[in-house]
Amino acid sequence: MGLNRFISLNHFLKHMGSNSVRHRSSVAAKGASIVGVKDIIAVASGKGGVGKSTTAVNLSVALAKACQMKVGLLDADIYGPSIPTMMNLHEKPEVDRDMKMIPIENHGVRCMSIGFLVGKDAPIVWRGPMVMSAIEKLTRGVAWGDLDILVVDMPPGTGDAQLSISQRLQLSGALIVSTPQDIALIDARRGANMFRKVQVPILGVVENMSCFECPNCGTKSYIFGQGGAQRTAEEMDMKFLGEIPLELDIRSSSDEGNPIVVASPHSASAKAYTSVAEKVTERLKELAEERAMGPQISL
C-alpha cells in the first residue's frame, strides 16, 4: 500500500498549510463522515489525569481482540500525545499514492498521532487554528481503510478543539471517563453537556480508578471516593458502563506499550475493559436501530 516514503513534521506542516485557506469553508462539512469508517466514537473527559487515554487504548484493543472488530485509534490530544508510548509505536507513518498517511498498527489497532511526527519531549506550541488544521489532517488525511469503529482519544476539556471535533466528525457517540471524586465529576458533567449541546449521543460513563485492592491482604480502598460516577450517570440519565480498578499493572503495562488487555487478559482490569467494549458495541447497535427507525410522520 505504501511507497516506502515516510512523512516528516516539516512535510506534514507544509501540506497542512497548503490547505489552510480552504480550511474554514470547505475542508469539512459539519457532520461529515470518514470514508470507510462505520462508527466514530469519542473517549472524553472534562479534565486531564483521569485515565482517558489509557481507557481509549485498552478499549480499542479490547474491541479488536475480544469483539473481533476492525479498529482505528486517533490521538486527537495534539498538545500531549500519549498513544505512541502506550501502543509502543515510534516510527514515522508512510504516505500512499494519494499522499494520505498510512496508520501504524499494533495489537490489531490502526493508530495515528501527531506524536509519530515529533520528538518524545518536543513541545507543540501552536495556536487554535493550527491545532484544528492538524486534527483535520490526522482524520481525513489518513488512509484508514475499512473500519468498524474509529476511537478518538479526545483532548481534555471543553474548548474549541473539542467542540470542533464534535461538530466536524459524524460521531456515533461519546464515552465519558471520570474518577469517582467530586472534582473530576464536575468536569465530567460539563463534558457530557457539551456533547449533548452538539447532539452527540452519550454512550455511557466509565468510572476509572474506582477501587484499589491490596495485593497482599485483599482489602479494598476507595481512594478517590466510592460510586460517584454511577450516581452521576443516574442523575444525568446516562448509562453506567462499568468500573476500572486502580491497579499497578495498568500503569506499568501502559508505560511499556503493552496494554493490560494484552499483557494480562485474565486480570480484573482487563475483564473490566472488555466488558466496557462489549457494552459500547451493544449501545452502538441500539443507536443504529434508533436512527434506522427515524421519526414517525403521520398525516
Image (cartoon, rainbow, N blue to C red):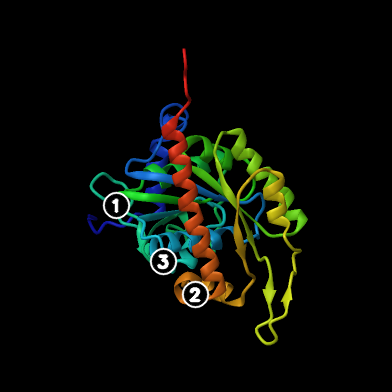
Q: Disc 1 marks which residue?
A: 95
Q: Position of residue 47 (x, y in %)?
A: 67, 52
Q: Position of residue 228 (x, y in %)?
A: 73, 57
Q: Mark 2 and mark 3 in contact (Cβ < 8 Å)? A: no
Pointer 1 local density, CA inside 10 Å: few below 14, some 14–19, many at least 20: many
Q: Residue at x 64, y 71 (%)?
A: 246
Residue ranking furthest to the front:
299
Q: Position of residue 286 (x, y in %)?
A: 47, 43
Q: Residue at x 36, y 50 (%)?
A: 148
Q: CA distance from mark 3 to mark 2?
A: 11 Å
Residue 167: which disc? none
Tag count: 3
Q: CA distance from mark 2 to mark 1?
A: 27 Å
As helix, strand or loop, the secondary structure at mark 2 comes to loop
Residue 18 lies, with reference to residue 240, above or below; the image says above
Q: Disc 2 marks which residue?
A: 256
Amino acid at circle 3: Leu
As helix, strand or loop, the secondary structure at mark 3 comes to loop
Amino acid at circle 2: Glu
Earlier-in-chain disc, 1 versus 3 = 3
Pointer 2 local density, CA inside 10 Å: few below 14, some 14–19, many at least 20: few
